Image: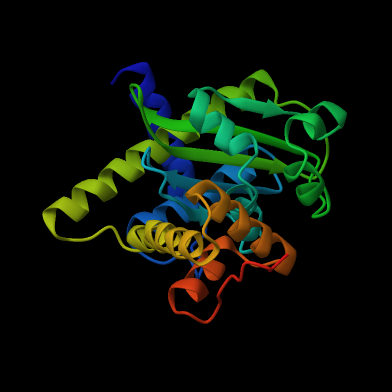
Amino acid sequence: MNDRSSRVHRVAGLVAREPARTDDGVGVVGELRRLCSAAERSLIASGVGVSVMAENGMRGVAAVSAPAYEAIEELQFTLGEGPCLDAYATRQPVLVPELAEAAMRRWPGYVPAVRGRGLQAVFAFPLQVGSVPLGVIDVFRVRPGALSATQFRLALDFADAAVTTLLDGQEQATSGTGAAGLDDAMGHRAELFQAQGMVAVQLGVPLADALARLRAHAFAENRPLGEVARDVVARRLTFEIDQS
C-alpha cells in the first residue's frame, strides 16, 4: 500500500467510526455526510461541507456535517464568490485563517454573509483527479486561526477520500446501482440554467445579467438560489423589466 493509499485508508477508518445519524442517507451522499462529520471532529472545525461542480457550470451542495451548513455552502453559489469557488478555479487550497479586511476586499459579499452566521475562518480544498476538478471540501471555524501543519495534511487526506467516494459513486451510477442523492445535488443546477434563460428572455438582457438578477433576488429574499430558480421554471416567479 503506497503512502497516499495508506492515508486515505486511515481517513476511511475515521469515517467508518463516525456514529450513524438518521439523516445521513444512503449511497455516496450518505458516505460524504459521514466524511464531513469525521472531518469536522478531526480538524476541530465547526462545520464541513462538500460541493460538487462541473466545468460546464453545474454546481451543487452534496453533503454537510450539520444541516445549518447547507445554507452556508449554498451562499457561495448565490453570491458567485468565495474561497470554495476560488479553490475550484485555481485547483489550489484557499486558506483564510481570519475573515478580516483582506478577505473582505477579495469577497465583499461573501465575507459579511458568513461572518453574520458566526464564522471567522474558512479553508477550501479542491477535489480533483489529476487536472480534472470534481468539487471542493470546505472547512469552517467559528474562531480565527490557521490550520496546523498536521491539520493541513489531514484536510488534504479528507479531500482525497472525498474524491474516492465521488468516483465510487460515479461507478455505481454507471453500473446502474445509482449514486443515491448525488443526482439531486446537481439536478437543481440544471434548473438554474433553465431559469437563467427564462429571465434573460423576460428582461431582454444577456445571460450573465440574468444570473446576476437571480442571485440578487435570492440574496434579498434569504433563499437558496436553487429554490428561486425552481420557482422561475415553474412560473411561480417572473422578473419584470421595471423590477429592482
Q: Is residue 233 left or right of residue 5?
A: right
Residue at x 62% of width, y 45% of height: 40
Q: In this view, does 31 lie to the left or right of 109?
A: left
Whether residue 98 can be seen here: no
Q: How many marks?
A: 0
Hey, which quadrant is residue 39 in on the image?
Answer: top right
What sort of colour scheme is used for the picture?
A: rainbow
The front one of 194 and 185 is: 194
Residue at x 43% of width, y 46% of height: 52
Establish if 242 lies above or below 193.
below
Hey, which quadrant is residue 220 in on the image?
Answer: bottom right
Residue 118 spot, x, y in % from top left = 82, 51
Residue at x 64% of width, y 37% of height: 43
Whether residue 113 can be seen here: yes
Residue that extends furthest to the left in the rendered view of this protein: 175
Establish if 153 lies above or below 134.
above
Residue 122 spot, x, y in % from top left = 70, 37
The front one of 12 and 25 is: 25
Q: In this view, does 238 lie to the left or right of 127?
A: right
The front one of 130 and 82 is: 82
Q: In which quarter of the image is the N terminus?
A: top left
Q: Quadrant of the C terminus?
A: bottom right
Residue 113 spot, x, y in % from top left = 77, 51
The front one of 218 and 244 is: 244
Residue that extends furthest to the right in the rendered view of this protein: 101
Residue at x 71% of width, y 69% of height: 221
Establish if 72 lies above or below 165.
below
Residue 223 spot, x, y in % from top left = 65, 67
